[in-house]
Image (tube, rainbow, N blue to C red):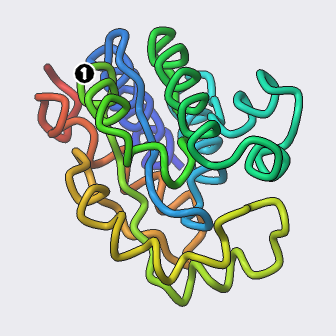
Amino acid sequence: MAHDAIQKAAENGAESAIVRLLGARSVVLVGMMGAGKSSVGRRLASRLALPFIDADAEIEAAAGMTISEIFEKHGEPYFRAGEARVIARLLANGPQVLATGGGAIMDPSTRALIRDKGVSIWLKADLDMLLRRTKRRSDRPLAEKIKDLLPLREPIYSQSDIVVESRDDPYDSIVDEIVAALPPRLGTGAEGAP
């Protein structure tokens, strides 16, 4: 019982150190659709006591239509330009946990903004998992192209500050891995001391 209390206090100390070291920067989750960015992001935000923002939901709210409708009515270049503007606006409001759309980081200016105003985490998932998780989703206009998009995007995703395998483990274990990986990346030891 006492060990659990000590462990919880240590976790809280590490998490508050992470938030302190982030300053105004955001934790930015990148990766393919189906990698678990929103599910992991919500849990990570809760652990760090930071707001969780889903860039796709923000884009839909700003446009007043779904991403599928934006693609259908205006095309992908129009969507990508709006996505870049929304992410730039969101990154100005850190710290937060921000889940980006699968193709957002392909834009060089968005990549540069994420590098300047965030810590990027690639939720790396294999093709089989991505296909399994997206096959029933009709709200993702590029879902049927995952096989083609993955090899194009992985070299860019691999430039992320932290890489974490997305897997069929409970999302909380993936969050634990991210929480453990952030302090060294932010310039402190695993114990959370600056």
The 10 Å Cα crowd at callout 1, few under 14, some 14 to 19, many 20 or more, is few
- Residue 166 % position (x, y): 47, 69
Residue at the spot 13% in from the left edge and 29% down from the top edge: 188
Residue 61, by quadrant, is: top right
Q: Describe residue 58's horizontal placement relative to residue 18 as left or right.
A: right
Q: Position of residue 49 (x, y in %)?
A: 57, 24
Quick check: 91 left or right of 20?
A: right
Q: Residue 189's x, y, as percent?
A: 12, 36
Q: Give the residue displayed 56% in from the left and 43% down from the top.
A: 77
Q: Toward which corner of the image does residue 62 lie, by quadrant? A: top right
Q: Nearer the viewer, residue 36 or 110?
A: 110
Corner quadrant of residue 90: top right
Identify the amino acid type marked 1: Asp
Is 192 above or below relative to 44? above
Please determine whether, in this image, residue 174 is positioned above or below residue 178: below
The structure residue drawn at horizontal position 40% and vertical position 30%, both measured from the top left corner, is: 15
Residue under pointer 1: 116
Q: Secondary structure at mark 1?
A: helix
Q: Position of residue 57 (x, y in %)?
A: 75, 36
